[in-house]
């Protein structure tokens, strides 16, 4: 089954009202490449304005709480994202796992909450540098997959992003062979969900993706898209990644 390429911008803690124009330029360019699904996950404060500007293109959150409501000062619940027009959410980003102490169980609970709210999920996994250097990257990531992927996943609304922590924002990327080995291992691990599901779930690569390296990374058989940080903030940098995905 062909998996539609999925290119997602994670704006992290970047962007103010004036940045909506950049998103509009990105979505306008993406309209010319219907074979690629293009989404942006801006900070919570911009979701409403970006949904209004996106003319149906997917806009998402970068995190959600696992509860539907309650006394959790500063947090945003998945039904709130859905209510404001978001259609997806990133969960388990390494900046949340590491910086906010989120465990696999926390990430799984967030993914379940998001799916229950009708959102699509991009669930992130990825190893730190010392684990890569010690040769344990695949085992580490498969433990994250086993611990954080919900029991029921609908491939139409669930994707995994493999983001090696040492590749995020550093300009470093794994070798193509290492990317292929990791994505293949993740897909094999998903076979516990049934062969059809394992084949249909999109597995994105993230970590220093740019217009120069996107075609090679996205050309790997089990790489179904990219989760892009720094290079997603402007149309000038993000659109070439979309074009690379479209050219495959
Ligand atoms: P960079 O593309 O800036 O390396 O960030 C990757 C990332 O963390 C996306 O979620």
Image: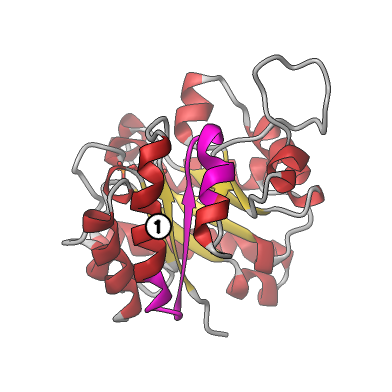
> How far across and down, in percent of the image, does residue 108 sit?
70, 40
Q: Does residue 4 appear anywhere in the picture?
A: yes
Q: Does residue 163 appear anywhere in the picture?
A: no
Q: Is 49 placed above or below 242 here? A: above
First to last magenta residue range: 30-50
Q: Closest to the observer: 5 or 149?
A: 5
Q: Closest to the observer: 136 or 246?
A: 246
Secondary element at tag 1: helix
Q: Is 225 placed above or below 85 here? A: below
> How far across and down, in percent of the image, does residue 188 sit?
56, 65
Q: Closest to the observer: 153 or 127?
A: 153
For the C terminus, which image quadrant? bottom left
- Residue at point 57%, 53% (across, down): 52
Q: What is the residue that sits farthest to the bottom in this orientation? A: 1
> How far across and down, in percent of the image, does residue 247 sit?
29, 81
**From the viewer's perspective, is 92 left or right of 215?**
right
For the N terminus, which image quadrant? bottom right
- Residue at point 72%, 71% (across, down): 194
> How far across and down, in percent of the image, does residue 58 sit?
56, 59
The total number of labels drawn is 1
Q: Is 200 placed above or below 63 here? A: below
The figure's colour scheme reads secondary structure
Return the residue at label 1: 24
Of the four image quadrants, the one with ligand 1 is top left
Mark 1 close to ligand 1, CB under 8 Å: no
- Residue at point 46%, 33% (across, down): 94
- Residue at point 36%, 64% (across, down): 180
């Amino acid at each position: 089954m062909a998996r539609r390429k999925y290119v997602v911008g994670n704006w992290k803690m970047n962007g103010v009202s004036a940045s909506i124009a950049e998103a509009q330029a990105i979505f306008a360019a993406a309209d010319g490449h219907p074979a690629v699904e293009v989404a942006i996950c801006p900070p919570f404060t911009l979701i409403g304005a970006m949904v209004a500007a996106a003319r149906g293109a997917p806009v998402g959150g970068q995190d959600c709480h696992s509860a539907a409501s309650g006394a959790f000062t500063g947090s945003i619940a998945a039904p709130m994202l859905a209510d404001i027009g978001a259609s997806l959410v990133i969960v388990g980003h390494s900046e949340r796992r590491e910086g906010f102490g989120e465990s696999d169980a926390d990430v799984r609970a967030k993914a379940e909450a998001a799916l229950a709210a009708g959102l699509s999920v991009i669930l992130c996994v990825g190893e730190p540098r010392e684990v890569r250097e010690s040769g344990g990257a695949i085992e580490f990531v498969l433990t994250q997959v086993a611990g954080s992927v919900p029991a029921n996943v609908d491939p139409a609304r669930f994707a995994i992003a493999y983001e090696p922590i040492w590749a995020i924002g550093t300009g470093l990327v794994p070798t193509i062979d290492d990317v292929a080995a990791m994505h293949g291992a993740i897909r094999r691990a998903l076979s516990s969900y049934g062969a059809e599901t394992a084949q249909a779930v999109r597995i994105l690569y993230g970590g220093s993706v740019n217009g120069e390296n996107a075609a090679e990374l996205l050309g790997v058989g089990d790489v179904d898209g990219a989760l892009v940080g720094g290079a997603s903030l402007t149309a000038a940098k993000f659109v070439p990644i979309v074009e690379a995905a479209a050219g495959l």
